[in-house]
């Protein structure tokens, strides 16, 4: 299906600059924007520490987002090889990064307007959870499409638990379950990190 969007007339390289290298630059820029958003958000929070009310939930979500960025940059190495297979492969490669970017935008508020991060997270956690769970769902789909994992693998089940906890918490506005959902997904990140360290 993805090969339907493949352009056969593109050269494999141009003056020694390969197509994969060329396409990878775009993905790198998207990652850079997301990392910059996180670093800028953290630096603004630190500079405004006397003027804002911190939130443990917000802090844990920012740590999770940054760790997701690190893991995805590492895992992307295995996916770079498919970029040259066609436009469809290129599209699915940058879709998770786009979700991460919007996730970072929603996670870090304008601190000139939002001084209380507890109140901000109460207002915004649903969209943040939906972006987070969308990211996990898109990554599962890509992993299956690229034959990285089988749909029956434990990895899919573990990610599915993470998606389910966040979607239910967001859909039913279960504030008291919010931290539990965050902790469950941090544990999933830890398990994923161990799995990646052992297998990649």
Image: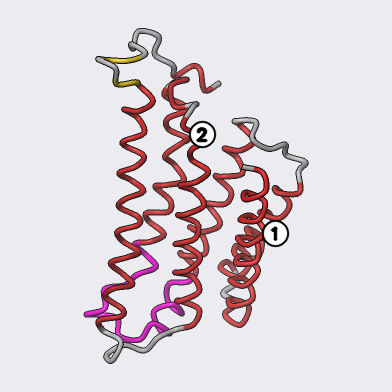
- For marks 2 and 1, give the one nearer the viewer: 2
Q: Residue furthest top?
A: 9
Residue at image position (67%, 48%) is 198
Side of 126 relative to 28 (left or right): right
Which mark is first along the chain, 1 or 2? 2
| Element class at badge 2 | helix
Q: Which mark is residue 79?
A: 2
Indicate the position of residue 110 as horizontal and vertical percent values: 26, 73
Position of residue 159 relative to residue 92, above or below, is below
* Residue 22 placement: quadrant: top left
Name above or below for residue 7 compared with residue 71: above
Using a 10 Å C-alpha cutoff, classify the residue at mark 1 as few (fewer than 14 neighbours), some (14 to 19) or many (20 or more).
some
Q: Is residue 128 left or right of residue 52?
A: right
Image coordinates for residue 186, horizontal then vertical, percent: 60, 67
Disc 2 to disc 1: CB gap under 8 Å: no
Q: Quadrant of the C terminus?
A: top right
Q: Residue at x 35, y 55 (%)?
A: 34
Residue 37 sits inside the magenta stretch: no
Viewer-side residue, 159 vs 28: 28
Q: Is residue 198 above or below residue 126?
A: above
198 sits left or right of 59 in the view: right
Instruction: State the scheme by which the image is colored.
Output: secondary structure
Residue, disc 1: 161
Front-most of 121 and 200?
200
Q: Residues within 10 Å of mark 2 (few under 14, many from 20)?
A: some
Residue 52 lies, with reference to residue 39, above or below; the image says below
Measured as percent of width and height from the top left, residue 107 is found at: 39, 68
In this view, the residue farthest toward the left is: 112
Q: What's the magenta region?
A: 105-125
Residue 53 percent across, percent down from the top left: 36, 89
């Amino acid at each position: 299906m993805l090969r339907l969007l493949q352009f056969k007339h593109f050269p494999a390289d141009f003056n020694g600059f390969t197509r994969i290298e060329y396409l990878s630059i775009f993905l790198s820029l998207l990652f850079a924007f997301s990392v910059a958003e996180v670093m800028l958000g953290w630096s603004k929070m630190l500079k405004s520490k006397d003027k804002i009310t911190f939130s443990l939930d917000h802090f844990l979500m920012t740590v999770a987002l940054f760790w997701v960025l690190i893991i995805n940059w590492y895992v992307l190495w295995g996916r770079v090889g498919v970029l040259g297979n066609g436009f469809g492969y290129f599209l699915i490669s940058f879709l998770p990064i786009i979700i991460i970017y919007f996730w970072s935008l929603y996670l870090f508020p304008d601190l000139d307007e939002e001084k209380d991060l507890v109140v901000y997270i109460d207002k915004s956690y649903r969209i943040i959870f939906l972006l987070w769970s969308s990211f996990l769902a898109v990554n599962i789909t890509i992993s299956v499409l690229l034959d990285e994992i089988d749909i029956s693998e434990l990895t899919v089940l573990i990610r599915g638990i993470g998606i389910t906890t966040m979607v239910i918490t967001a859909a039913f506005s279960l504030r008291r379950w919010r931290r539990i959902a965050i902790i469950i997904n941090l544990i999933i990140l830890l398990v994923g990190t161990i799995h990646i360290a052992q297998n990649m």
